[in-house]
Image (tube, coloured by chain):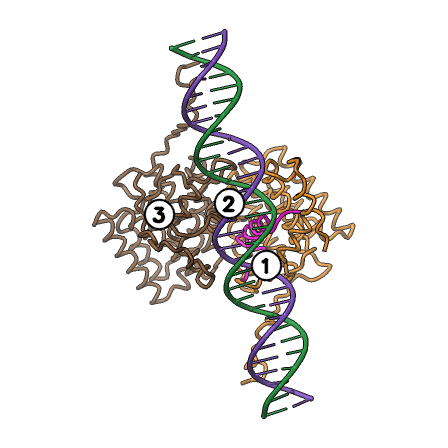
Chain colours: A brown, B orange, C green, D purple
Amino acid sequence: MNQRQTVAERKAPGPRLGKNGDGAERHEAIYRSISDAIIEHRLKPGARLREDALAEVFGVSRTGIRKILQRLALEQLVTLTPRRGASVTRPTADEAKDVFDARQMVECGLMPEVARRITEADVSELREMARREREALKGGEQSAAIKLSAAFHARLAGISGNATLADFVGRLCSRSSLILAVYGNAGHLGCESHDHDDLIGYLEAGNGERAAAFMSRHLKAIEASLSIVEEEGEAPDLHEIFGG
Amino acid sequence: MNQRQTVAERKAPGPRLGKNGDGAERHEAIYRSISDAIIEHRLKPGARLREDALAEVFGVSRTGIRKILQRLALEQLVTLTPRRGASVTRPTADEAKDVFDARQMVECGLMPEVARRITEADVSELREMARREREALKGGEQSAAIKLSAAFHARLAGISGNATLADFVGRLCSRSSLILAVYGNAGHLGCESHDHDDLIGYLEAGNGERAAAFMSRHLKAIEASLSIVEEEGEAPDLHEIFGG
DNA sequence: GACCGAGTATGCGTATACAATACCTCGCAT
DNA sequence: ATGCGAGGTATTGTATACGCATACTCGGTC
C-alpha cells in the first residue's frame, strides 16, 4: 500500500528531544496526521496500524501512540480488537445508514439556527472553503476535496453555536469519509460541486427552512450515490451462494 | 497508604489473576465504577481524581487508570488539565444549554422512529425501569433515581435502532446528570414521576408525534427546573460587580 | 498429500522507573 | 506584618522493560 506519510521522517536519530515541553502539541499533531491520513483515504479501511511502526515513524514511544490510537478508536476511526491490534475501521452498511440518518437529523435540524446566527465573516469563510473544495475537485485532488468537504460541513455546524452538536457533526463527517472510502464510487465524490454554494446562498438570505430542505436533499444525494454492497469478505455465506 | 495489592502481585509468580486475560473486563468494570459514581453524584463536580489514589483503590497500576481517565475525558465526564490532573467536570451554563438543546433535537427527533419500532418486550422493560425509578424516588434514593432516569432515556433512544444516535443520547444523558449535580435543586429531581409512564403510553399507541411533543415538554421542564446561576467562582467579573 | 501439533515469533497489555513541572510552604526582606 | 522568592514535595507525563497470548510456520504422522 501507499504509505508515504506526510511526516517526512523526523530523521533526528537522537530521540532525546522527546522532552516534555511540546509533548502535548506533538501528540496533537500526530493525532491529526493520522486522522487526516484516514479521512483523506491515504490510509484505507482495513489497513493495519502497528504500534511500533507508528511509534518509530513519528519518533515517539509506543505509550504515546497507544493514547492516540485509543482516542481514534473512541471516534470510531480505527477499530481496536483486543489482541489483533489497531486497524482503520471498515464501516458496515448498517453503520453507514446510521451515520447518514444521524447527519440528516442533526445537520438539517441545525440549519435554522445557523441561518439565524450566520455573519458576513462566516459567509466569506464558507465561500472560500467551497471555492477551494471546487478547485481541488477540478484539479483531481480527491483527498483534499474529501477533507475540505468534511471541514465545510463541520464548520457549518459550528456556526450554530452549539459546541456539543458541532462536535458530533464533526465526528459524523469523519466517519462519512470512511464510508465514502468503502462504498463510494471512484470519480463520483459525494458532494456535488455547486451544492455547497447554493446552501450558503440560502443561509445568507436567512432562509433556514430552505437551507434545511436543501441540506436534506444534499445528504440524500450523497447517500444515494453510495453503492452499498455487502462485501462480507471475511465470511462469505456459502449457503446463500450455493443455494444450500 | 495501603500497598498490599501491588506488592502481593509483584512477588506472586503464579499468573493467577490480573495478568492479561481479564484485563479488558477489569478495566471495563473500573470504568463503569467511576462513571457510575460520577453519574450518581457520589463524586461531585470539581472533585479531584488522583491517579495513584485510583490505582491503589482498584488495585491496578497507574497506566490502566490513565487509559480510563482519558476515556472519561473524551466523554466529558472528567476534565483533564495538562499538569493538574483529572477532576470531575463542572459543566458551564453554556454547556448545559448546549446539552439540553441537543437532547431536544435528537431525542424528540427519534421518537417517531421509536414509536414505529417499539415492541411489547420493549414496553414492559421500559415500564419496569420507570417503576424502579419511581420507587427509588419515593424511597429517597436520589443517586439511584438519577442513574435510572438517564438509563431510561438512553434505552429509549436505543429502540430507534440507530446505534450512533443512541450512543450520543447516552452521553448526553450522562452529562445531564452532571448538570443536575451542579444546577439542580435538591429534592426536585429533573424528571417528574409520571412523565416517563405517560411517554411509554404514547409510544405504545404508536403515536410518535405525541411522544415527540411530550418529550419536548419533558426536557423543557427539566431544563426549566435548573437554577442556572453563573457561579464563576474562578473569575468573578469585578467590573460587573462594582459597576466599572 | 493433508491435517494436526509443537515451536517460534510477533505484538499487545501492564508495571515500573525516571524526568519535568506545578503547587505549596517557609524564610527573608522591606 | 506583608509580599515576594526560592526550594521542596507531590503528581503527572513519558519511556522502557517484561510477560503473556495469539498467529504463523514447519515438521511429523496418518
Q: What residue type is labelled 2?
A: Leu
Q: Which residue lies furthest to the right in this view?
A: B139
Disc nearest the viewer among 2 and 3: 3
* C-alpha distance separating marks 2 and 1: 28 Å
Q: Which amino acid does label 3 sit on?
A: Ala
Give the label on residue A37, or none.
3
**Quadrant that contains the C terminus of chain A:** top left
Q: Using the image, name the chain to which the residue with label 1 belongs.
A: B
Residue under pointer 2? B165
Give the label on residue B86, or none.
1
Element at label 3: helix
Mark 2 on the same chain as mark 1: yes
Q: What residue type is labelled 1?
A: Ala
| Residue B144 position within the rendered picture, expressed as x and y whole percent measured from the top left | 71, 49
Q: Using the image, name the chain to which the residue with label 2 belongs.
A: B
Disc nearest the viewer among 2 and 1: 1
| Residue D28 position within the rendered picture, expressed as x and y whole percent measured from the top left | 47, 13
Marks 1 and 3: CB-CB under 8 Å?
no
Where are the magenta residues, as a range?
Answer: B59-81
Residue A112 appears in which quarter of the rendering? bottom left
Q: Using the image, name the chain to which the residue with label 3 belongs.
A: A
